[in-house]
Image (tube, rainbow, N blue to C red):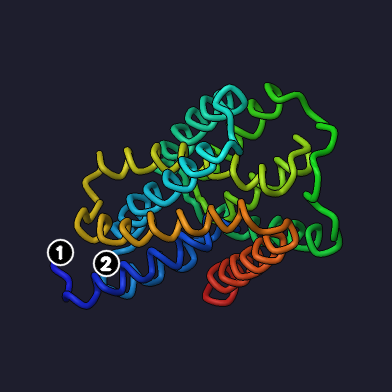
Amino acid sequence: MELEFYFYLIFIATGFVAGFIDAIAGGGGIITIPVLLASGMPPHVALATNKLQATFGSGMASLNFVRKGFIAYNEVMWGIFYTFIGAVAGTYAILLIDASLLSRAIPVMLAMIFAYILFSPNMGEIDKHALLKANSFYLIFGLGIGFYDGFFGPGTGTFWTIAFVGLLGLNLKKATAHTKIMNFTSNIVSLGVFIWSGNVLWIAGFVMAIGQILGAYMGSNMVIKKEVGFIRGAFLTMVGLTLLKLLYSSYLTS
């Protein structure tokens, strides 16, 4: 598939904005996927190419968080393991099951999360006592959210962040950092399946990845430097926008 040159300039700019926002609050896909579709890509090609560029963004954000001491591998290795398994199962399941079965349930869950964040002004300010042991937490949510990201995807970062804050007791900065590691894991799995299926537009994906890497680096630095209130506001905004996008896609266009 050949694209006009100006689309590549748009891809770089879009990748930068999406990478920056996604590193802070998640939801970068609601920016990148419409742009890829607007270029004339078929939906499955747009989704595959989006996974390529998103992998670079989540990878850069993860690396930056690790370098700055927000993540220790011994704390997340079981999460990576279970998320990988869950994402493999979810990506395989999407080949067998209609993903639209989930499309109407996810906006309801996101609306509940939005309300929870909105009415919890002190959410994630400090580390709190974990309600689950780490191994049990990662077994449940690694398999569950990993499966969901491989199967469907929208809101994955939101679900991870809320789970880290509410059940593992992490503050919002650490939760955001750990979320990127899990996002990177499930992105790699989905990308592998899309590569196998031959749907990735490599040049477009790599061009957008350039913007993603720069945006993710700057966005992750913003998380490190800013207070929790800023992250909470950005997170709330992206949850709201993701919710509106899914409501529009699931209900208003059906």
Q: Which residue is mark 2?
A: 41
As helix, strand or loop, the secondary structure at mark 2 comes to: loop
- Where residue 122 appears, x then y in whole percent? 85, 55
Mark 2 to mark 1 CA distance (whole Å): 8 Å
Q: Residue at x 64, y 34 (%)?
A: 141
Hey, what amino acid is under mark 2?
Met
Numbered label attached to residue 236: none
Q: Residue at x 34, y 62 (%)?
A: 43
Query: Seen in the image, is 171 located left or right of residue 121?
Result: left
Vertical arrangement, residue 35 with respect to residue 50, above or below: below
Q: Quarter of the image holding residue 235? A: bottom right
Vertical arrangement, residue 170 with respect to residue 110, above or below: above
Q: Which residue is mark 1?
A: 1
Query: Seen in the image, is 124 located left or right of residue 103?
Result: right
Hey, what amino acid is under mark 1?
Met
Q: Quarter of the image holding residue 93? A: top left
Which circle's residue, 2 or 1, is located before the other in the chain?
1
- Where residue 25 appears, x then y in whole percent? 60, 58
User: Which quadrant is home to the N terminus?
Assistant: bottom left
Vertical arrangement, residue 149 with respect to residue 144, above or below: below
Crowd band around label 2 with a 10 angstrom C-alpha radius: few (<14), some (14–19), many (20+): some
Query: Seen in the image, is 243 located left or right of residue 42?
Result: right
**Which residue is farthest left?**
2
- Where residue 252 appears, x then y in whole percent? 58, 77
As helix, strand or loop, the secondary structure at mark 1 comes to: loop
Q: Residue at x 80, y 50 (%)?
A: 125
- Where residue 156 appears, x then y in whole percent? 57, 49
Q: Quarter of the image holding residue 167? A: top right
Contact (CB < 8 A) between labels 2 and 1? yes
